[in-house]
Image (cartoon, rainbow, N blue to C red):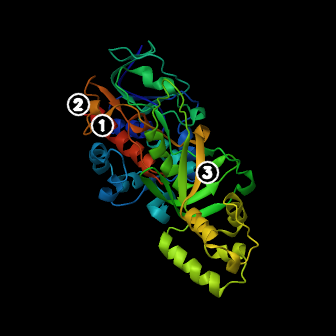
Amino acid sequence: MKEYDIAVIGGGPAGMMAAIAASQNSSSVVLLEKNPSLGRKLLLTGGGRCNITNNKPIKQLLNSFNNKNFLKHSFYTFTNEDLFSLFDFEFIQEDNNRVFPKSEKSSDVLDGLIKKLDNVVISYNFEVKTITEDFIINDEIKADKIIIATGGVTYPQTGCNIKNYSLTSQPLTDIKYGLSPLITEKDLSDIAGITLNDVVISYKKSRVRGNVLFSHVGLTGPGIINLSNEISEGISYNLLENDPEVDLEIAIDLCPEYGREELFKRFTSDFQSKGKTMLKNYLKLFLTNSFIDFFLGEIDLDGEVQLSRINKKSKNRLVENLKRFTFKIIGFNDNLAKVTVGGVDLKYVNPKTMESTLTPGLYFAGEVLDVHGPTGGYNLKIAFSTGYLAGLSASEK
């Protein structure tokens, strides 16, 4: 049986970073990866460009997370500057503080991390099935300490598996889909590819501003993806036990820069001064051109009618739907969910070390924890910072 000071389970961003940090203190470290290569999910991030982090100031960054107090110590222990210093190439910052390698290749980030694993034993095609109380893994490896960085339930082709949660007896919160496109009851094939820019999407009391992209099966885009977390958390289900039953309505404010009364007054004025203009042409002032026919068909208004011929009832219907255009949602497009909502219960993990408060010597990092953020580099930030803190803490004598 092989023996190591530290065994890291999972070769994703959190696991690789944990192994890098642990090996800096000259501990004997083994990284166990069930795939024949490391970082499969990392290669997919940012559309293959790797949105490696979000570069907001730490205080602002923390306010974007559901459990900011838990993450605070790890974010200050391993900052974005620390992350960038690991690589021998440059990064670029784009809109909304998103950071990418200048080459726009996620493979460069992966290669850079692998270079830092020189002092780590990497065991590929090693699927962890059992961990005993005295930290014997698969009856093959004995470790003094173990770091679990097995990810969540998203992208199962990368090695993530719901069975990984049962490797320990650590308490869990409900496991759910996060950052997921939404499936609509209505077939949207005719408008697939159309984007609504800078609209406000709402579900109950949650409101998110961003872009909405129509797909063949429903809605996606940054605005929808971020709202999906609120929707998922608001539904009672646990993927360890059952799939979600989704039957709800979301609304899109297509003209967030106008209030209802303001919009109605403008219409009243314009419908008089531009009376001969057809409705579908007038709406180009407010809507994406390719979306107008679909919109008018859904609210049963004739796009060929002149503005002067539109009565007050139709005007009210137009305003109401521009401010609250609804879609019935019947499911999550789980094949494209980016993160997992839920995981290892943070009440039983020390935020200053990432060590279990129930099992000394057992640490957690990354998506396996009950922490998640919006799209835009936030979740990789969690992976790198919690991974580093877990590795550093585990390697301290």
Q: Splitting the image into 4 quarters, where does residue 137 fall?
A: top left
- Seen as rendered, the residue at the extreme left is 397
Classify 10 Å Cα crowding around label 2: few (below 14), some (14-19), many (20 and above): few
The amino acid type, in three-letter code, at marker 1 is Asn
Q: Mark 2 points at which residue?
A: 397
Q: In this view, does 387 lie to the left or right of 246?
A: left
Q: Quadrant of the N terminus?
A: top left
Task: Give the residue displayed 65% in from the left and 68% down from the top.
Answer: 288
Disc 3 to disc 2, how far (Cα)? 50 Å
Depth check, mark 3 against mark 2: the one in front is 3
| Labels 1 and 2: the sequence-earlier one | 1
Depth check, mark 3 against mark 1: the one in front is 3
The amino acid type, in three-letter code, at marker 3 is Leu
Q: Along the line of sight, which residue is nearer the eye, 252 or 263?
A: 263
- Residue contact between numbered discs 1 and 2, judged by CB atoms under 8 Å: yes
Q: Name the residue under label 1.
A: 25
| Labels 3 and 2: the sequence-earlier one | 3
Element on which disc 1 rests: loop
Disc 3 to disc 1, how far (Cα)? 47 Å
Q: Can residue 105 be spotted in the picture?
A: no
**Does 303 sit above or below residue 324?**
below
Q: In this view, does 257 lie to the left or right of 286?
A: left
- Tally of numbered tags: 3
**How far across and down, in percent of the image, does residue 289 sit?**
69, 69
Element on which disc 2 rests: loop
Q: Along the line of sight, which residue is nearer the eye, 112 or 63?
A: 63
Residue 263: assigned label:
none
Disc 1 to disc 2, how far (Cα)? 9 Å
**How far across and down, in percent of the image, does residue 361 sit?**
29, 25
